Image: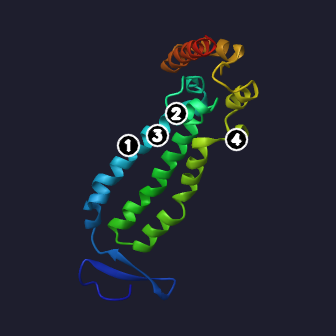
């Protein structure tokens, strides 16, 4: 370590260059920073709230979103919705931003700035794309089959074989969730055909 150990921070040389110095806290007091105490738990809850429904939807347990009636003006104009893809990339964007809180607590401004300047924008660009369009070949197999069958609100996202396979699952919360979703999907399709 270069420099003295006086004060809260000690300076460490990185790669032998004086230009690449970072301040490393000499104590664990940075863990008590508000960014860590409040930000990390709050962002973790937001990430879970975004990624869990995206996981269920893209896994195929929740498919009624494909045939649900439109809820906003943009959805009325499009026959297909890309909702879980948007949830997925919103969750990944928040997850990508989480290290910036640690860097802020450590006073590593260059690392925090880098997170917001580069990695954060990768899922954000995909989020913006998924709001208006998503290529079927980048979806899960069931989604590609549904899109190939028409991919609109009047096409059931469950095949007869998938419905039979869901009915044959062992009794569990997952089976009950899938069967409820199949019934909801059928009701939405009947309403669309109505």
Of the two numbered discs 3 and 1 on the same chain, state the one appearing first in sequence.
1
Marks 1 and 4: which is nearer the front?
4
Q: Residue visible at 73% across and 27% down?
A: 145
Q: Residue visible at 23% across and 81% down?
A: 7
Of the two numbered discs 2 and 3 on the same chain, state the one appearing first in sequence.
3
Quadrant showing the N terminus: bottom left
Measured in 3D between alpha carbons, the distance from the residue under mark 2 to the one under mark 4, in whole angstroms, is 21 Å
SS assignment at label 2: helix
Q: Which residue carries the number 3 mark?
A: 50
Q: Which mark is residue 73?
A: 2
Q: Work out whether 17 lies above or below 186.
A: below
Looking at this view, name the residue that lies furthest to the right: 148
Q: Which residue carries the number 1 mark?
A: 45
Label 4 Cα crowd, 10 Å radius (few <14 / some 14-19 / many 20+): few
Residue 24, image quadrant = bottom left
Measured in 3D between alpha carbons, the distance from the residue under mark 3 to the one under mark 1, in whole angstroms, is 9 Å
Measured in 3D between alpha carbons, the distance from the residue under mark 4 to the one under mark 3, in whole angstroms, is 21 Å
Q: Which residue carries the number 4 mark?
A: 135
């Amino acid at each position: 370590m270069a420099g003295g150990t006086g004060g809260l921070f000690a300076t460490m040389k990185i790669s032998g260059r004086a230009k690449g110095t970072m301040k490393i806290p000499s104590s664990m007091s940075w863990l008590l920073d508000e960014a860590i105490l409040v930000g990390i738990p709050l962002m973790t809850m937001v990430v879970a709230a975004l990624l869990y429904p995206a996981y269920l939807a893209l896994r195929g347990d929740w498919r009624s979103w494909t045939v649900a009636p439109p809820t906003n003006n943009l959805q009325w104009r499009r026959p297909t919705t890309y909702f879980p893809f948007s949830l997925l990339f919103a969750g990944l964007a928040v997850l990508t931003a989480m290290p910036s809180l640690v860097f802020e607590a450590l006073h590593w401004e260059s690392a925090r700035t880098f997170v917001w300047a580069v990695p954060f924008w990768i899922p954000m660009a995909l989020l913006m794309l998924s709001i208006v369009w998503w290529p079927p070949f980048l979806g899960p197999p069931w989604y590609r089959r549904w899109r190939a069958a028409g991919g609109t609100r009047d096409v059931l996202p469950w095949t007869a074989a998938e419905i039979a396979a869901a009915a044959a699952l062992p009794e569990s919360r997952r089976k009950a969730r899938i069967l409820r979703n199949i019934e909801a999907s059928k009701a939405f399709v009947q309403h669309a055909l109505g």
